[in-house]
Image (spheres, rainbow, N blue to C red):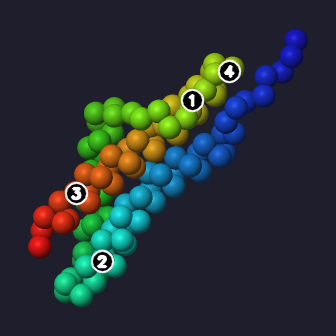
Amino acid sequence: MSHLVPIVDPRTASAISEWALYGWPIAVTGLVLLIRWRHIESRIAFALLGYLICTGVGAFTRLFGFNVFWLRVAEHTPGDIILVKLVNASLSIAFLGAIVSVAPVPLAQ
């Protein structure tokens, strides 16, 4: 009986998912804050509100189950399939959430 080696390491998949879910609101809010630095009066309030809005948009996109298949997997073990679905869902939430969060910014001039 041969031992199957998992395709995706659970620690790596967890780290990717964690950075995708919690890192993108900080990145998007920080980018918009840098671009609009001179026009924003209360930068701390903007950063806090921006992070909360991005997190809310992420939770909203999570409800729809939108999925882009960033990773593909051959079905070696059930753990591989679960981890790949976790990473795909996390990256999809971050991708769609970033687009939906930043899309209204150019319109608000």
Q: Amino acid at mark 1?
A: Arg
Label 3 SS: loop
**Position of 40 relative to 84 (above/below):** below
Q: How many marks?
A: 4
Crowd rating for badge 3 (residues with CA inside 10 Å; few <14, some 14–19, many 20+): few
**Position of 6 relative to 30 (above/below):** above
The residue identified by callout 2 is: 35
**Position of 76 relative to 1 (above/below):** below
The residue identified by callout 3 is: 103
In this view of the protein, which residue sits in the foreground, 76 or 22? 76
What is the C-alpha distance between the residues marked 3 and 1? Answer: 29 Å
Please tell me in which quadrant of the rendered image residue 105 appears: bottom left
The picture places residue 70, in percent across and down from the top left corner, at 50, 37
Determine if residue 51 is in view: yes
Q: Is residue 37 left or right of residue 4?
A: left
In this view of the protein, which residue sits in the foreground, 7 or 83? 7
Q: Quadrant of the N terminus?
A: top right
Q: Earlier in the sequence, mark 2 or mark 3?
A: 2
Tag of residue 72: 1
Please tell me in which quadrant of the rendered image residue 72 appears: top right
Mark nearer the viewer, 1 or 4: 1
Q: Amino acid at mark 3?
A: Ala
